[in-house]
Amino acid sequence: MTDTQAPRPGAPSRVRLWVILGVAGLALAIAAWVGLGNAGQAKECPVQREAAEAIDLAAVGELAALNGTGEGRGYATMAFKDAGGADMTIADFKGKALLVNFWASWCVPCREEMPALDALATKYNSDAFMVLPINLDIGEGGQEKAQAFLDENSFANLPLYADNTFAAFERLKQQAVAVGLPATLVLDENGCELAVLQGPAHWDTPDGEAVVEQMIALAS
């Protein structure tokens, strides 16, 4: 009868050792795959920390909730339609700094914010800057409801642009940029994100105008 050698105290069994090595190897493989994936994932825009910080510094008082980002997110391909149903994207406004406001006729804070946005657009809309409202009323008659609200209030500089598929805003939700309405993106002249505001703001104030003037200065 042969003697069986007992394992040394504290030494892992051969099965346990293989399990440990297998888990470690899998973790390394996952880490390498994630690293390669991130390395190959091009940003739509360059990181613009200085521009974002400039917007952040201008955002005080009534605009204190506006957060500078500049992390490389871009929206040139974000699609929506004009009042006549023609396809458009943010790229159609290339060359202008954009204040992109997402709103819906059923959203009470959105409705309350619209007069301030119209006043801002009336003062600042130009070849260098534009307030770009994108309506998100969905379902049958959604666009008609949005147009009726704009007509009822006789907004001079808030034309109807709409995305009744809600895809544009779903993109913001998936990227944790915004979670509810209203939401506003501050974009540079190439459609690159510089700042985000979740919720309404009194844009027709010196604080709101200071942000817009900083946007125009950065775009010039």
Image (spheres, rainbow, N blue to C red):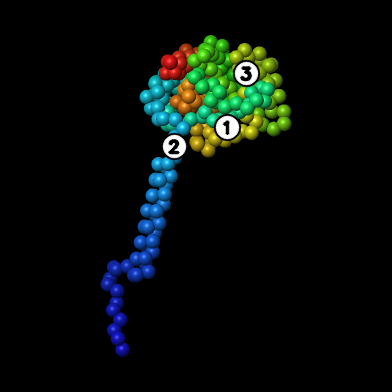
Most foreground residue, 109 or 21 = 21
- Of helix, strand and loop, which one carries label 1? helix
Q: Residue at x 55, y 23 (%)?
A: 92
In this view, 169 is above or below 132: below
Say whether disc 1 or disc 2 marks the residue closer to the N-terminus: 2
Residue occupied by mark 2 = 42
Most foreground residue, 126 or 8 = 126
Say whether disc 3 or disc 2 marks the residue closer to the N-terminus: 2
Residue occupied by mark 3 = 159
Q: Residue at x 27, y 72 (%)?
A: 8
Name the mark on residue 204.
Answer: none
Name the mark on residue 168.
Answer: 1
Quote the CA–CA distance across marks 3 and 2: 33 Å
The answer to whether marks 1 and 3 mark residues whose Cβ atoms lie closer than 8 Å is no
Judge from the rendering whether residue 43 lies leftward or rightward of residue 161; answer left or right: left
- Tell me where residue 23 appears, x and y as whole percent: 39, 59
- Tell me where residue 77 appears, x and y as whole percent: 54, 30
- Tell me where residue 59 appears, x and y as whole percent: 44, 20
Q: Residue at x 69, y 28 (%)?
A: 142
Which residue is situated farthest in the right direction here? 140
Mark 2, Cα crowd under 10 Å, few <14 / some 14-19 / many 20+, is few
* Mark count: 3
Judge from the rendering whether residue 187 lies leftward or rightward of residue 32; answer left or right: right
* Residue 214 seen by the camera: no
